[in-house]
Image (cartoon, rainbow, N blue to C red):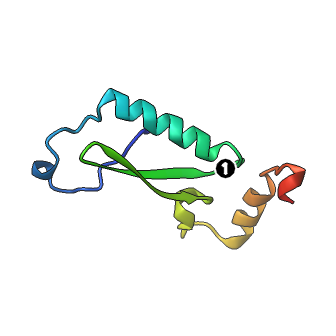
Amino acid sequence: KRLYERINENEDDVPNSELDFHISENLIKYAENLAKPFPFVRVDFYVVENKIYFAELTFTPNANILKAYKDVFLNRLGEKLILPKKYK
């Protein structure tokens, strides 16, 4: 489970590659709370100068960029996701 991904390509721009432990704990807590109502979701944040900013919720794997798979396969895969009745 990857906690974060650096979006800045220049190593010199980001002196610390490790997030502060307190920030990491908060990211996990916030992500779990935001994701709680959904059976599948990716929660994205930005951390800028040790401040956490919410970015987005993504409801498809790989941001729905699955070019290697045909629609038939993707439909079968989607059928495997069992949603609670309140989502149907």
Q: Return the residue found at the far left.
A: 12
Q: Is residue 43 above or below residue 75?
A: above
* Whether residue 1 is visible: no
Q: Which residue is mark 1?
A: 40
Task: Provide residue 54's location: percent of width, then percent of height.
Answer: 45, 54
28 lies above or below 37: above
Q: Quick one: label 1, few (<14), some, or many (20+) residues within 10 Å?
A: some
Q: Position of residue 8 (x, y in %)?
A: 23, 56
Please indicate, yes or no, whether residue 59 appears anywhere in the rendered image.
yes
41 horizontally vs 86: left or right: left
Report the residue that reaches farthest toward the top: 21
Q: Is residue 80 left or right of residue 18?
A: right
Q: Quadrant of residue 73?
A: bottom right
Q: Residue at x 43, y 39 (%)?
A: 2
Quadrant where the C terminus sits is bottom right
Instruction: Name which residue lies at 47% across and 52% down.
Output: 44
Q: Amino acid at mark 1?
A: Phe
Decide if residue 11 is on the left or right side of residue 17: left
Camera-side residue: 39 or 64?
39
Residue at horizontal 57 percent and vertical 59 percent from the top = 58
Residue in the foreground of this view, choosing between 20 and 79: 20
What x and y, as percent, mark residue 56? 50, 59
The tally of labels here is 1
Residue depicted at x 87% and y 54%: 86
Q: Nearer the viewer, residue 51 or 82?
A: 51
Question: Regarding mark 1 in the picture, which secondary structure is present there?
Answer: loop
